[in-house]
Image (spheres, rainbow, N blue to C red):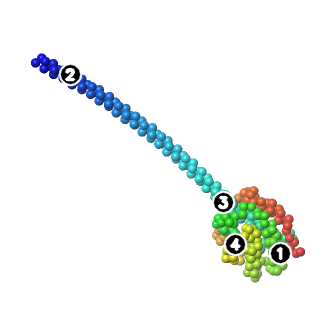
């Protein structure tokens, strides 16, 4: 019986040792699991911080990109409008030079108005619609020759007609003459080629042009594109003076005016 009791005691002791070892193993395993969980949690927190930081950097970059894009768009629009303003200013300067045609007679403002009836349609409005074929960055080399021919043409019309070109009794006849001259002579010189589609353009009428001349307050409503163009010319005066060569051109053409009665 004593031997059986010792065997039983030994067995119980073995079980106790095994339970103790298992408990130690279990505790050690739990510590490992806890450590792994803490490590994983720390890694997730670090990743979350990285993600948050990257998201913040992306937001900043997007804002900067949007700012740069917007800035470029604004610059592009500004350049686009300056080109339009310069183009219109060059055309205006050529018309003004023709208007100031004679050194001993009054300006030909009537010729200017007759010309504008066509040019508003075939040049000014296409420029304001963004047709770059009609842009003129600076006074072209041919400008003085165009002005010379225009002045000679004004003198010949003055010799043919006793009344102003804007008189309703001669308007139809003079419009045909002046517009044919622009389409076949002046504009091809200005742009280096003739556009056959110009022939299909219906110019503004005498009543419309008199309204343009005499009713400035109605210009924005009746001639919106041309009016917008005059606003651009006024706005970008500095850029026009710096880039187009109009100042030098004005000095030259004022020295070559004709005598009204040679």
246 vs 23, left or right, is right
Q: Nearer the viewer, mark 3 or mark 2?
A: 2
N-term mark: 4 or 3 = 3
Question: Within 10 Å of the Cα at label 4, are there few (<14), some (14-19), or many (20+) other Cα atoms?
Answer: few
Residue marked by disc 2: 13
Determine the residue positioned at 64% across, 66% down: 129
Determine the residue positioned at 76% across, 73% down: 185
What x and y, as percent, mark residue 72? 62, 54
Looking at the figure, which quarter contains the N terminus?
A: top left
Q: Nearer the viewer, mark 2 or mark 4?
A: 2
Q: Nearer the viewer, mark 4 or mark 3?
A: 4
Whether the residues at callouts 1 and 4 have beta carbons within 8 Å, the answer is no
Whether the residues at callouts 2 and 4 have beta carbons within 8 Å, the answer is no
Residue marked by disc 1: 155
State the residue lying farthest toward the bottom: 169
Q: Nearer the viewer, residue 186 or 202?
A: 186
Q: Nearer the viewer, residue 129 or 232?
A: 129
Disc 4 element: loop
Whether the residues at callouts 3 and 2 have beta carbons within 8 Å, the answer is no
Residue marked by disc 3: 80
State the residue lying farthest toward the top: 2
């Amino acid at each position: 019986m004593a031997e059986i009791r010792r065997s039983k005691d030994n067995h119980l002791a073995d079980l106790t040792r095994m339970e103790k070892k298992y408990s130690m193993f279990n505790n050690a395993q739990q510590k490992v699991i806890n450590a792994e969980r803490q490590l994983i949690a720390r890694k997730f927190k670090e990743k979350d911080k990285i993600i948050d930081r990257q998201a913040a950097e992306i937001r900043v970059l997007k804002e900067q990109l949007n700012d740069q894009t917007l800035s470029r768009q604004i610059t592009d629009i500004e350049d686009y409008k300056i080109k339009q303003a310069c183009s219109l200013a060059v055309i205006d300067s050529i018309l003004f030079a023709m208007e100031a045609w004679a050194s001993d007679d009054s300006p030909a403002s009537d010729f200017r108005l007759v010309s504008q009836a066509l040019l508003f349609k075939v040049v000014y409005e296409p420029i304001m619609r963004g047709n770059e074929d009609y842009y003129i960055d600076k006074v072209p080399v041919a400008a003085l020759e165009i002005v010379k021919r225009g002045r000679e043409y004004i003198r010949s019309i003055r010799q043919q007609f006793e009344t102003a070109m804007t008189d309703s009794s001669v308007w139809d006849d003079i419009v045909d003459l002046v517009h044919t001259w622009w389409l076949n002579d002046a504009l091809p010189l200005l742009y280096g080629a003739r556009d056959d589609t110009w022939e299909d353009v219906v110019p503004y009428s005498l009543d419309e042009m008199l309204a343009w001349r005499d009713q400035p307050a109605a210009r924005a409503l009746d001639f919106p594109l041309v009016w917008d163009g005059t606003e651009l010319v006024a706005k970008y005066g500095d850029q026009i003076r710096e880039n187009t060569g109009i100042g030098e051109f004005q000095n030259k053409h004022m020295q070559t005016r004709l005598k009204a009665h040679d």
